[in-house]
Image (tube, rainbow, N blue to C red):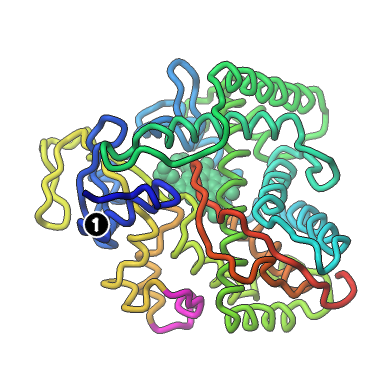
Amino acid sequence: MLDLRDEEAPLRAMERMADIYGPIYRLRLQGKETLVVSSASMMKEIMDEKRFMKTAIPGLSREGEPSGVIIAGTLDPDWEQGHRMLRPAFGPIKIEDMFDGMKDVAHQMIMKWARFGPDEEIAITEDSSNLTLDTIALCTMDFRFNSFYRNGAHPYVAAMNTVLGHVTQNLTSKPIITKTMSYFGGDAPITAQTAHEAQSVMNKTAQEIIETRRSSTERKNDFLDMLLFGKDPKSGEVMRDELIKAQMSTFLVAGHETTSGLLSFAVIKLLQNPETYRKAQDEVDRVLGGGAITLEHTRELKYIYAVLQETLRLIPTAPIISKIPHPHRKDQVTTLGGKYKIDQGTRVRLLLGKCMSDPKVFGEDAREFKPDRMMESDPGYQQIEKYWRPFSEGSRACLGRPFSLQEAVIALSLILQNFDLRLADPMYNMRIKQAVTVKPLGLSVKAMLRHGMT
Ligand code: HEM
Protein backbone atom coordinates (compact mmCIF):
# COMPACT_ATOMS: atom_id res chain seq x y z
CA MET A 1 0.00 0.00 0.00
CA LEU A 2 1.18 3.52 -0.77
CA ASP A 3 2.48 5.11 2.43
CA LEU A 4 2.55 8.89 2.32
CA ARG A 5 3.14 9.65 5.98
CA ASP A 6 6.67 10.93 5.30
CA GLU A 7 5.44 13.73 3.06
CA GLU A 8 5.76 17.06 4.85
CA ALA A 9 2.44 18.50 3.65
CA PRO A 10 -0.81 17.36 2.01
CA LEU A 11 0.27 19.19 -1.14
CA ARG A 12 3.43 17.09 -1.44
CA ALA A 13 1.42 13.89 -0.89
CA MET A 14 -0.99 14.90 -3.66
CA GLU A 15 1.92 15.73 -5.96
CA ARG A 16 3.53 12.40 -5.26
CA MET A 17 0.33 10.60 -6.14
CA ALA A 18 0.32 12.53 -9.43
CA ASP A 19 3.80 11.11 -10.13
CA ILE A 20 2.41 7.64 -9.53
CA TYR A 21 -1.14 7.82 -10.93
CA GLY A 22 -0.69 10.39 -13.69
CA PRO A 23 -2.07 13.81 -14.63
CA ILE A 24 -5.60 13.10 -13.41
CA TYR A 25 -6.68 10.88 -10.56
CA ARG A 26 -9.59 10.43 -8.16
CA LEU A 27 -9.20 11.03 -4.44
CA ARG A 28 -11.53 10.82 -1.48
CA LEU A 29 -10.88 14.05 0.39
CA GLN A 30 -12.67 14.60 3.69
CA GLY A 31 -15.35 12.14 2.71
CA LYS A 32 -15.96 13.54 -0.78
CA GLU A 33 -14.66 12.47 -4.12
CA THR A 34 -12.48 14.95 -5.99
CA LEU A 35 -10.40 14.87 -9.15
CA VAL A 36 -6.80 16.03 -8.94
CA VAL A 37 -5.30 17.42 -12.15
CA SER A 38 -1.67 18.24 -12.90
CA SER A 39 -1.19 18.71 -16.64
CA ALA A 40 -0.73 22.11 -18.29
CA SER A 41 -3.24 21.44 -21.07
CA MET A 42 -6.01 20.28 -18.71
CA MET A 43 -5.27 23.30 -16.48
CA LYS A 44 -6.09 25.55 -19.44
CA GLU A 45 -9.34 23.68 -20.05
CA ILE A 46 -10.33 24.05 -16.40
CA MET A 47 -9.56 27.76 -16.42
CA ASP A 48 -12.03 28.21 -19.29
CA GLU A 49 -14.90 30.00 -17.54
CA LYS A 50 -17.48 28.79 -20.04
CA ARG A 51 -16.77 25.26 -18.88
CA PHE A 52 -15.73 25.49 -15.20
CA MET A 53 -16.64 27.76 -12.34
CA LYS A 54 -15.28 28.63 -8.90
CA THR A 55 -17.60 27.94 -5.96
CA ALA A 56 -17.15 29.01 -2.31
CA ILE A 57 -13.79 27.72 -1.08
CA PRO A 58 -14.52 24.58 0.96
CA GLY A 59 -13.47 24.93 4.61
CA LEU A 60 -13.01 28.70 4.43
CA SER A 61 -16.56 30.05 4.02
CA ARG A 62 -18.78 30.11 7.13
CA GLU A 63 -22.52 29.45 7.15
CA GLY A 64 -24.53 32.64 7.63
CA GLU A 65 -21.51 34.98 7.41
CA PRO A 66 -20.61 37.06 4.35
CA SER A 67 -17.51 35.97 2.44
CA GLY A 68 -14.82 38.26 1.03
CA VAL A 69 -14.14 38.17 -2.71
CA ILE A 70 -11.58 35.37 -2.65
CA ILE A 71 -13.70 32.93 -0.71
CA ALA A 72 -17.17 33.63 -2.18
CA GLY A 73 -18.59 31.52 -5.00
CA THR A 74 -19.03 33.06 -8.45
CA LEU A 75 -22.84 33.01 -8.24
CA ASP A 76 -22.84 34.75 -4.83
CA PRO A 77 -24.11 38.37 -5.31
CA ASP A 78 -21.57 39.48 -2.66
CA TRP A 79 -18.73 38.30 -4.91
CA GLU A 80 -20.12 40.27 -7.86
CA GLN A 81 -20.54 43.42 -5.79
CA GLY A 82 -17.08 43.09 -4.21
CA HIS A 83 -15.44 42.37 -7.56
CA ARG A 84 -17.03 45.40 -9.24
CA MET A 85 -16.17 47.75 -6.39
CA LEU A 86 -12.64 46.51 -5.67
CA ARG A 87 -11.20 45.94 -9.12
CA PRO A 88 -10.49 49.65 -9.74
CA ALA A 89 -8.56 49.87 -6.43
CA PHE A 90 -5.94 47.43 -7.75
CA GLY A 91 -5.31 48.70 -11.27
CA PRO A 92 -1.69 49.41 -12.35
CA ILE A 93 -1.87 53.18 -11.75
CA LYS A 94 -3.24 52.78 -8.22
CA ILE A 95 -0.47 50.29 -7.48
CA GLU A 96 2.18 52.73 -8.67
CA ASP A 97 0.77 55.23 -6.16
CA MET A 98 1.53 52.68 -3.43
CA PHE A 99 5.25 52.65 -4.23
CA ASP A 100 6.25 54.92 -1.33
CA GLY A 101 4.33 52.87 1.24
CA MET A 102 5.92 49.64 -0.04
CA LYS A 103 9.39 51.15 0.05
CA ASP A 104 8.82 52.54 3.55
CA VAL A 105 8.04 49.13 5.04
CA ALA A 106 10.78 47.35 3.05
CA HIS A 107 13.27 49.84 4.51
CA GLN A 108 12.11 48.99 8.02
CA MET A 109 13.04 45.35 7.41
CA ILE A 110 16.39 46.23 5.84
CA MET A 111 17.27 48.51 8.78
CA LYS A 112 16.47 45.71 11.20
CA TRP A 113 18.71 43.26 9.37
CA ALA A 114 21.53 45.83 9.18
CA ARG A 115 21.40 46.29 12.95
CA PHE A 116 21.50 42.54 13.49
CA GLY A 117 24.98 42.22 12.01
CA PRO A 118 26.36 39.32 9.94
CA ASP A 119 26.08 36.54 12.53
CA GLU A 120 22.45 36.82 13.62
CA GLU A 121 20.10 34.16 12.25
CA ILE A 122 17.17 35.82 10.47
CA ALA A 123 13.95 33.83 10.26
CA ILE A 124 13.23 35.10 6.80
CA THR A 125 9.72 33.65 6.53
CA GLU A 126 8.61 35.53 9.64
CA ASP A 127 10.18 38.80 8.58
CA SER A 128 8.67 38.43 5.11
CA SER A 129 5.27 37.97 6.75
CA ASN A 130 5.75 41.10 8.85
CA LEU A 131 6.82 42.98 5.75
CA THR A 132 3.90 41.96 3.58
CA LEU A 133 1.25 42.31 6.28
CA ASP A 134 2.44 45.80 7.24
CA THR A 135 2.59 46.75 3.56
CA ILE A 136 -0.92 45.65 2.66
CA ALA A 137 -2.36 47.35 5.76
CA LEU A 138 -0.48 50.59 5.09
CA CYS A 139 -1.09 50.73 1.34
CA THR A 140 -4.77 49.76 1.32
CA MET A 141 -6.09 50.99 4.70
CA ASP A 142 -3.48 53.54 5.81
CA PHE A 143 -3.07 51.50 9.00
CA ARG A 144 0.29 50.69 10.59
CA PHE A 145 0.83 47.42 12.44
CA ASN A 146 4.48 48.48 13.03
CA SER A 147 5.56 44.85 13.26
CA PHE A 148 9.26 45.74 13.00
CA TYR A 149 9.05 48.04 16.01
CA ARG A 150 7.25 45.90 18.54
CA ASN A 151 7.91 42.87 20.67
CA GLY A 152 5.27 40.28 19.92
CA ALA A 153 2.47 40.63 17.43
CA HIS A 154 -0.15 43.39 17.19
CA PRO A 155 -3.43 42.07 18.76
CA TYR A 156 -5.06 41.97 15.31
CA VAL A 157 -2.17 39.93 13.91
CA ALA A 158 -2.17 37.55 16.88
CA ALA A 159 -5.94 37.04 16.45
CA MET A 160 -5.59 36.56 12.70
CA ASN A 161 -2.90 33.91 13.23
CA THR A 162 -5.23 32.08 15.63
CA VAL A 163 -8.10 32.13 13.13
CA LEU A 164 -5.80 31.01 10.32
CA GLY A 165 -4.37 28.27 12.54
CA HIS A 166 -7.89 27.03 13.22
CA VAL A 167 -8.75 27.00 9.52
CA THR A 168 -5.53 25.15 8.71
CA GLN A 169 -6.19 22.64 11.44
CA ASN A 170 -9.65 21.94 10.03
CA LEU A 171 -8.32 21.62 6.53
CA THR A 172 -5.41 19.34 7.29
CA SER A 173 -5.81 17.46 10.55
CA LYS A 174 -8.57 15.14 9.34
CA PRO A 175 -7.46 12.10 7.38
CA ILE A 176 -7.14 13.82 4.05
CA ILE A 177 -6.48 10.74 2.04
CA THR A 178 -8.67 8.04 3.44
CA LYS A 179 -6.78 5.02 4.78
CA THR A 180 -3.36 5.93 3.37
CA MET A 181 -2.62 9.11 5.21
CA SER A 182 -3.79 10.13 8.61
CA TYR A 183 -1.30 12.53 10.07
CA PHE A 184 0.13 15.85 8.99
CA GLY A 185 1.41 17.00 12.36
CA GLY A 186 0.85 20.50 13.65
CA ASP A 187 0.82 22.78 16.64
CA ALA A 188 -1.36 22.48 19.74
CA PRO A 189 -5.04 22.33 18.70
CA ILE A 190 -7.01 25.59 18.63
CA THR A 191 -10.55 25.21 19.94
CA ALA A 192 -13.58 26.61 18.12
CA GLN A 193 -14.20 28.90 21.12
CA THR A 194 -10.65 30.35 20.93
CA ALA A 195 -11.04 30.89 17.20
CA HIS A 196 -14.40 32.59 17.76
CA GLU A 197 -12.89 34.96 20.33
CA ALA A 198 -10.01 35.75 17.99
CA GLN A 199 -12.50 36.52 15.21
CA SER A 200 -14.22 39.00 17.55
CA VAL A 201 -10.88 40.75 18.16
CA MET A 202 -10.40 41.03 14.38
CA ASN A 203 -13.92 42.39 13.88
CA LYS A 204 -13.45 44.93 16.66
CA THR A 205 -10.17 46.24 15.16
CA ALA A 206 -11.76 46.39 11.70
CA GLN A 207 -14.73 48.31 13.15
CA GLU A 208 -12.33 50.80 14.78
CA ILE A 209 -10.46 51.32 11.52
CA ILE A 210 -13.80 51.88 9.75
CA GLU A 211 -15.03 54.38 12.34
CA THR A 212 -11.75 56.33 12.31
CA ARG A 213 -11.93 56.60 8.54
CA ARG A 214 -15.61 57.58 8.51
CA SER A 215 -15.02 60.34 11.04
CA SER A 216 -12.12 61.80 9.03
CA THR A 217 -12.79 64.63 6.59
CA GLU A 218 -9.75 63.68 4.49
CA ARG A 219 -10.47 61.36 1.52
CA LYS A 220 -7.68 58.94 0.56
CA ASN A 221 -9.16 57.32 -2.51
CA ASP A 222 -7.70 53.94 -1.46
CA PHE A 223 -9.16 50.45 -1.07
CA LEU A 224 -10.89 51.31 2.21
CA ASP A 225 -12.37 54.56 0.87
CA MET A 226 -13.71 52.68 -2.13
CA LEU A 227 -15.44 50.20 0.16
CA LEU A 228 -16.76 52.80 2.60
CA PHE A 229 -17.77 55.62 0.29
CA GLY A 230 -18.00 53.94 -3.11
CA LYS A 231 -21.12 52.58 -4.77
CA ASP A 232 -21.59 49.45 -6.78
CA PRO A 233 -21.42 50.79 -10.38
CA LYS A 234 -24.18 48.36 -11.44
CA SER A 235 -26.74 48.57 -8.65
CA GLY A 236 -25.76 51.91 -7.07
CA GLU A 237 -25.82 50.21 -3.64
CA VAL A 238 -23.28 50.79 -0.87
CA MET A 239 -21.58 47.80 0.74
CA ARG A 240 -22.90 46.69 4.15
CA ASP A 241 -20.48 46.91 7.11
CA GLU A 242 -20.38 43.16 7.73
CA LEU A 243 -19.22 42.55 4.18
CA ILE A 244 -16.69 45.42 4.38
CA LYS A 245 -15.14 43.75 7.44
CA ALA A 246 -15.02 40.41 5.63
CA GLN A 247 -13.29 42.10 2.66
CA MET A 248 -10.76 43.73 5.00
CA SER A 249 -9.82 40.40 6.62
CA THR A 250 -9.70 38.70 3.24
CA PHE A 251 -7.30 41.27 1.85
CA LEU A 252 -5.08 41.31 4.90
CA VAL A 253 -4.76 37.54 4.80
CA ALA A 254 -4.60 37.01 1.02
CA GLY A 255 -2.51 40.11 0.55
CA HIS A 256 0.32 38.99 2.78
CA GLU A 257 0.60 35.18 3.10
CA THR A 258 1.14 34.56 -0.60
CA THR A 259 3.66 37.33 -1.22
CA SER A 260 5.68 36.56 1.91
CA GLY A 261 6.00 32.95 0.77
CA LEU A 262 7.07 34.16 -2.67
CA LEU A 263 9.83 36.31 -1.21
CA SER A 264 11.14 33.53 1.04
CA PHE A 265 11.10 30.96 -1.78
CA ALA A 266 12.82 33.42 -4.14
CA VAL A 267 15.64 33.88 -1.61
CA ILE A 268 16.17 30.15 -1.14
CA LYS A 269 16.07 29.53 -4.89
CA LEU A 270 18.70 32.23 -5.47
CA LEU A 271 20.90 30.85 -2.70
CA GLN A 272 20.63 27.34 -4.08
CA ASN A 273 21.52 28.62 -7.56
CA PRO A 274 24.50 30.98 -7.03
CA GLU A 275 24.76 31.92 -10.69
CA THR A 276 21.23 33.34 -10.62
CA TYR A 277 22.02 35.12 -7.35
CA ARG A 278 25.01 36.84 -8.96
CA LYS A 279 22.99 37.79 -12.02
CA ALA A 280 20.19 39.24 -9.91
CA GLN A 281 22.59 41.21 -7.72
CA ASP A 282 24.46 42.49 -10.79
CA GLU A 283 21.22 43.78 -12.24
CA VAL A 284 20.32 45.55 -9.00
CA ASP A 285 23.81 47.12 -8.83
CA ARG A 286 23.57 48.24 -12.45
CA VAL A 287 20.05 49.71 -12.20
CA LEU A 288 20.07 51.13 -8.68
CA GLY A 289 23.78 51.75 -8.25
CA GLY A 290 24.28 52.99 -4.72
CA GLY A 291 21.10 55.11 -4.78
CA ALA A 292 17.59 54.79 -3.41
CA ILE A 293 15.12 52.70 -5.42
CA THR A 294 12.52 54.61 -7.47
CA LEU A 295 9.37 53.55 -9.29
CA GLU A 296 11.22 53.92 -12.62
CA HIS A 297 13.88 51.47 -11.41
CA THR A 298 11.26 48.79 -10.77
CA ARG A 299 10.38 48.83 -14.50
CA GLU A 300 14.01 48.19 -15.42
CA LEU A 301 14.56 45.29 -13.01
CA LYS A 302 13.60 42.67 -15.59
CA TYR A 303 15.71 39.84 -14.23
CA ILE A 304 14.36 40.39 -10.70
CA TYR A 305 10.83 40.08 -12.13
CA ALA A 306 11.92 36.93 -13.95
CA VAL A 307 13.31 35.47 -10.69
CA LEU A 308 9.97 36.06 -8.98
CA GLN A 309 7.97 34.66 -11.89
CA GLU A 310 10.17 31.58 -12.11
CA THR A 311 9.82 31.08 -8.34
CA LEU A 312 6.03 31.24 -8.67
CA ARG A 313 6.11 28.79 -11.56
CA LEU A 314 7.91 26.17 -9.49
CA ILE A 315 6.34 26.96 -6.12
CA PRO A 316 3.07 28.85 -6.59
CA THR A 317 2.28 30.06 -3.09
CA ALA A 318 -1.48 29.59 -3.57
CA PRO A 319 -0.77 26.05 -4.74
CA ILE A 320 -4.21 24.53 -5.31
CA ILE A 321 -7.29 26.02 -6.92
CA SER A 322 -10.56 24.24 -7.29
CA LYS A 323 -13.52 24.46 -9.67
CA ILE A 324 -16.60 22.52 -10.69
CA PRO A 325 -18.07 22.07 -14.19
CA HIS A 326 -20.19 25.16 -14.86
CA PRO A 327 -23.66 24.39 -13.42
CA HIS A 328 -25.41 26.34 -16.20
CA ARG A 329 -24.10 24.00 -18.86
CA LYS A 330 -26.76 21.90 -20.54
CA ASP A 331 -24.71 18.71 -20.81
CA GLN A 332 -24.48 16.56 -17.69
CA VAL A 333 -20.96 15.41 -18.48
CA THR A 334 -17.94 17.39 -19.64
CA THR A 335 -14.80 15.81 -21.09
CA LEU A 336 -11.26 16.75 -20.09
CA GLY A 337 -8.16 15.97 -22.13
CA GLY A 338 -10.40 14.55 -24.85
CA LYS A 339 -11.19 11.41 -22.83
CA TYR A 340 -11.86 11.95 -19.11
CA LYS A 341 -15.60 12.30 -18.39
CA ILE A 342 -16.44 14.66 -15.53
CA ASP A 343 -19.94 14.61 -14.04
CA GLN A 344 -21.75 17.81 -13.08
CA GLY A 345 -20.96 18.79 -9.48
CA THR A 346 -17.60 16.98 -9.34
CA ARG A 347 -14.91 19.11 -7.72
CA VAL A 348 -11.68 19.36 -9.68
CA ARG A 349 -8.49 20.47 -7.94
CA LEU A 350 -5.54 21.83 -9.87
CA LEU A 351 -2.02 21.28 -8.54
CA LEU A 352 -0.65 24.49 -10.03
CA GLY A 353 3.03 23.74 -9.35
CA LYS A 354 2.76 20.44 -11.23
CA CYS A 355 0.78 21.98 -14.07
CA MET A 356 3.40 24.71 -14.47
CA SER A 357 6.26 22.24 -14.57
CA ASP A 358 4.68 19.96 -17.13
CA PRO A 359 7.58 18.97 -19.46
CA LYS A 360 5.18 18.96 -22.46
CA VAL A 361 5.02 22.76 -22.23
CA PHE A 362 8.02 23.77 -20.15
CA GLY A 363 10.55 21.30 -21.56
CA GLU A 364 12.67 18.54 -20.05
CA ASP A 365 14.33 21.03 -17.68
CA ALA A 366 10.91 22.12 -16.36
CA ARG A 367 11.81 21.37 -12.71
CA GLU A 368 14.96 23.48 -12.84
CA PHE A 369 15.13 27.08 -11.64
CA LYS A 370 15.98 29.08 -14.75
CA PRO A 371 14.72 32.67 -14.53
CA ASP A 372 15.98 33.37 -18.07
CA ARG A 373 13.03 31.45 -19.48
CA MET A 374 10.73 34.08 -17.93
CA MET A 375 12.51 36.97 -19.71
CA GLU A 376 10.43 38.42 -22.54
CA SER A 377 13.53 38.27 -24.74
CA ASP A 378 13.72 34.46 -24.39
CA PRO A 379 12.56 32.70 -27.61
CA GLY A 380 10.31 30.30 -25.66
CA TYR A 381 8.66 33.03 -23.57
CA GLN A 382 5.48 33.51 -25.65
CA GLN A 383 4.61 29.82 -25.39
CA ILE A 384 5.47 29.58 -21.68
CA GLU A 385 3.53 32.72 -20.80
CA LYS A 386 0.29 31.08 -22.01
CA TYR A 387 0.65 28.41 -19.33
CA TRP A 388 2.14 30.48 -16.51
CA ARG A 389 -0.87 30.85 -14.19
CA PRO A 390 0.13 31.21 -10.50
CA PHE A 391 -2.50 33.97 -10.23
CA SER A 392 -5.17 31.90 -12.04
CA GLU A 393 -7.07 33.34 -15.03
CA GLY A 394 -10.34 35.02 -15.99
CA SER A 395 -12.79 36.86 -13.75
CA ARG A 396 -11.61 34.95 -10.66
CA ALA A 397 -7.94 35.67 -11.25
CA CYS A 398 -5.95 37.36 -8.51
CA LEU A 399 -6.75 41.05 -8.08
CA GLY A 400 -3.46 41.57 -6.25
CA ARG A 401 -1.04 40.46 -9.00
CA PRO A 402 0.48 43.88 -9.79
CA PHE A 403 0.50 44.74 -6.08
CA SER A 404 2.37 41.61 -5.04
CA LEU A 405 4.92 41.74 -7.86
CA GLN A 406 5.75 45.42 -7.30
CA GLU A 407 6.07 44.82 -3.57
CA ALA A 408 8.29 41.75 -4.03
CA VAL A 409 10.51 43.49 -6.61
CA ILE A 410 11.13 46.37 -4.20
CA ALA A 411 11.88 44.09 -1.25
CA LEU A 412 14.11 41.65 -3.13
CA SER A 413 16.05 44.46 -4.80
CA LEU A 414 16.69 46.21 -1.50
CA ILE A 415 17.85 42.94 0.07
CA LEU A 416 20.29 42.24 -2.78
CA GLN A 417 21.47 45.83 -2.95
CA ASN A 418 22.34 45.96 0.74
CA PHE A 419 23.35 42.46 1.77
CA ASP A 420 25.21 39.34 0.84
CA LEU A 421 23.03 36.52 2.11
CA ARG A 422 23.98 33.01 3.11
CA LEU A 423 22.04 30.13 4.58
CA ALA A 424 22.28 29.97 8.39
CA ASP A 425 22.44 26.19 7.99
CA PRO A 426 24.46 25.37 4.86
CA MET A 427 22.87 21.89 4.86
CA TYR A 428 19.31 23.32 4.86
CA ASN A 429 17.02 21.00 2.96
CA MET A 430 13.91 22.80 1.83
CA ARG A 431 10.61 21.49 3.15
CA ILE A 432 7.34 23.33 3.00
CA LYS A 433 4.80 24.34 5.62
CA GLN A 434 1.29 24.32 4.24
CA ALA A 435 -1.59 26.33 5.64
CA VAL A 436 -3.94 27.92 3.13
CA THR A 437 -0.75 28.91 1.31
CA VAL A 438 2.77 27.45 1.38
CA LYS A 439 6.02 28.73 2.91
CA PRO A 440 9.47 27.26 3.44
CA LEU A 441 9.77 25.53 6.78
CA GLY A 442 12.54 26.62 9.19
CA LEU A 443 14.47 28.76 6.72
CA SER A 444 17.01 31.14 8.30
CA VAL A 445 19.66 33.28 6.64
CA LYS A 446 22.55 35.48 7.72
CA ALA A 447 22.88 38.91 6.12
CA MET A 448 26.21 40.69 5.73
CA LEU A 449 26.06 44.40 4.86
CA ARG A 450 27.82 45.07 1.56
CA HIS A 451 28.38 48.77 2.20
CA GLY A 452 26.66 51.64 4.06
CA MET A 453 22.84 51.56 4.05
CA THR A 454 20.99 53.02 1.04
C1 HEM B 1 -7.23 35.36 -5.98
C2 HEM B 1 -2.62 33.88 -6.10
C3 HEM B 1 -1.24 38.00 -3.92
C4 HEM B 1 -5.84 39.43 -3.69
C5 HEM B 1 -6.10 34.61 -6.19
C6 HEM B 1 -6.07 33.33 -6.83
C7 HEM B 1 -4.79 32.91 -6.85
C8 HEM B 1 -3.99 33.93 -6.25
C9 HEM B 1 -4.25 31.59 -7.44
C10 HEM B 1 -7.28 32.53 -7.31
C11 HEM B 1 -7.77 31.69 -6.17
C12 HEM B 1 -8.87 30.71 -6.52
O1 HEM B 1 -9.22 30.54 -7.68
O2 HEM B 1 -9.41 30.11 -5.58
C13 HEM B 1 -1.86 34.87 -5.51
C14 HEM B 1 -0.42 34.84 -5.41
C15 HEM B 1 -0.03 36.01 -4.81
C16 HEM B 1 -1.22 36.77 -4.53
C17 HEM B 1 0.45 33.67 -5.88
C18 HEM B 1 1.34 36.52 -4.45
C19 HEM B 1 2.47 35.99 -4.84
C20 HEM B 1 -2.36 38.75 -3.65
C21 HEM B 1 -2.37 40.06 -3.05
C22 HEM B 1 -3.68 40.45 -2.98
C23 HEM B 1 -4.49 39.40 -3.56
C24 HEM B 1 -1.14 40.84 -2.61
C25 HEM B 1 -4.26 41.72 -2.45
C26 HEM B 1 -3.64 42.87 -2.50
C27 HEM B 1 -6.58 38.45 -4.32
C28 HEM B 1 -8.02 38.55 -4.51
C29 HEM B 1 -8.42 37.38 -5.17
C30 HEM B 1 -7.23 36.59 -5.37
C31 HEM B 1 -8.91 39.70 -4.04
C32 HEM B 1 -9.84 36.98 -5.55
C33 HEM B 1 -10.27 37.59 -6.85
C34 HEM B 1 -11.72 37.21 -7.15
O3 HEM B 1 -12.05 36.04 -7.10
O4 HEM B 1 -12.48 38.12 -7.46
N1 HEM B 1 -4.80 34.98 -5.85
N2 HEM B 1 -2.32 36.04 -4.98
N3 HEM B 1 -3.65 38.37 -3.95
N4 HEM B 1 -6.14 37.27 -4.87
FE1 HEM B 1 -4.23 36.71 -4.96
Which amino acid lies under the numbered mark 1 shown in the image of this protein?
Met
Looking at the rendered structure, the number of numbered marks drawn on it comes to 1
- From the image, tell me which residue sits under label 1: 42
Q: Residue at x 63, y 32 (%)?
A: 160
Q: Is residue 397 visible?
A: no
Residue 447: image location, x then y, percent: 77, 68
Q: Taken as a whole, is the magenta stretch helix, strand or loop? A: loop
Q: Is 399 drawn above or below residue 248 in the view shown?
A: below
Q: Residue at x 48, y 74 (%)?
A: 369
**Relative to the observer, which residue lies in front, 53 or 122?**
122
Q: Residues within 10 Å of mark 1 (few under 14, many from 20)?
A: some
Residue 251 is a magenta residue: no
Residue 369 is a magenta residue: yes
Q: Residue at x 31, y 57 (%)?
A: 16
Residue extent of the magenta highlight: 368-379
Looking at the image, residue 17 sits to the left or right of residue 254; the answer is left
Looking at the image, residue 139 sits to the left or right of residue 26; the answer is right
Looking at the image, residue 376 sits to the left or right of residue 156; the answer is left
Q: Is 230 drawn above or below residue 401 in the view shown?
A: above
Looking at the image, residue 160 sits to the left or right of residue 76; the answer is right
**Relative to the observer, which residue lies in front, 426 or 205?**
426
Give the SS element for disc 1: helix
Q: Is residue 203 visible?
A: yes
